[in-house]
Image (cartoon, rainbow, N blue to C red):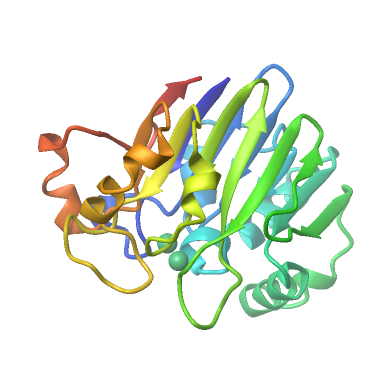
Amino acid sequence: MQLRFVGCGDALGSGGRFNTCFHVTGASVNFLIDCGASSLPALKSLGIAREAIDLVLITHFHGDHFAGLPFLLLDAQFTRRSRPLVIAGPQGIETKLANLMEALFEHSSKTKQRFDLSVTELEPEQSRTFGGVKVTPYPVVHGESGGPFLAYRVEAEGRVITYSADTEWTETLIPAARGADVFIAEAYYYDKVVKNHLSLKTLEAHLGKINAKKLILTHMSDDMLGRVDKLPYSAAKDGMIVEL
Ligand SMILES: [Zn+2]
Ligand SMILES: [Zn+2]
C-alpha cells in the first residue's frame, strides 16, 4: 500500500505547501483523507487520476481540509466520471457540503451528478467499512464551534494509518494511533502551547503510550518548518510517498 502526501500545509499555505490531502492506494483501495481548498490543483500537479478514487474521508469542516470538495465534484462532473464516489465525514456533512457548493458555484449543489454520489456521516468511535477500508473516527479538540472534529484510524490491506486531524492534545489520540503502522500527526508549533492545535513537544510527551511504528509530522507552521531539518522525526512534504 502507498500513502502519498498530496498536500501537508496548514490553512495559511505556510512554506508554499498545499492544503491537507493524503492519497492512499493499494491493490484494492484508493481513497483520500481530507480535501482542502487547494487539493484539486495539487492532485492534478501530481498526475493523480481522480476517477479511481472511491472514498474521501473528511476530518472537519475547515477550508484547508474540506473546501476542495466542490472543485473535486465539479471536476468529476466535467470529466464524465462514472464510478461511484463516497464522501464520509463528521455529522452535518451533507448540509455543510451543499452550503459550500452553493457559496462557491451557485446551483451546483442541485446538479444531478452523472455518477452515484453518497455523502455519509461518521459517528465517533463507531467503525464503518467502505469496500476494503475500515474507518474508526475519534473525537478531537479543535474549537468550541465548527465541529465535530474527528481523527481517523484507518485499516486497509493489513495496515493501519492514523491521522490526528487538527487538534490540541487529547487522550483519544492514544487509542486512535496505538500501534499504527503510520501516525500522521499535526505538529503546528515546536513548543508553543496554543488552543486547538498540537505542538511537537506536547506530542512527544505521549509518543511512548502511542507506540506507532512510524510518526510523520504534518500541518506545520513557519515556526516548525524552520526547524524541520534538525528534528529526529519524519516530516511530510508535498508529493512525498510512503510505502506501507
Ligand atoms: Zn488545518
Ligand atoms: Zn482545522
Nearer-the-camera pick, 173 or 84: 173
In the picture shown, does residue 108 fall above or below 77?
A: below
Taking the image as four quarters, which one is ligand 2 found in?
A: bottom left
Q: Vertical placement of 79 versus 232: above or below?
A: below
Please state, as top left, top right, bottom left or bottom right, where the N terminus lies in the image: top right
The quadrant in which residue 109 appears is bottom right
Whole-percent x, y for residue 59 in the image: 58, 58
Q: Measuring from the top left, give residue 86's x and y in whole percent.
A: 78, 48
Residue 164 at least partly seen: no
Residue under the point 52% across and 41% down: 162
Outermost residue on the front side: it is: 209
> In this rendering, does residue 91 appear at all?
yes
Quadrant of the image occupied by residue 25 = top right
Percent coordinates x, y for residue 106 in the rendering:
71, 78
Above or below, comparing residue 127 to residue 101 in the picture: above
* 13 lies left or right of 110: left
> Closer to the camera, 3 or 142?
142
Please state the horizontal and vertical placement of residue 21, each as a whole percent of the image. 50, 47
Residue visible at 89% across and 49% down in the picture:
116
Q: Front-most of 9 and 177?
A: 177
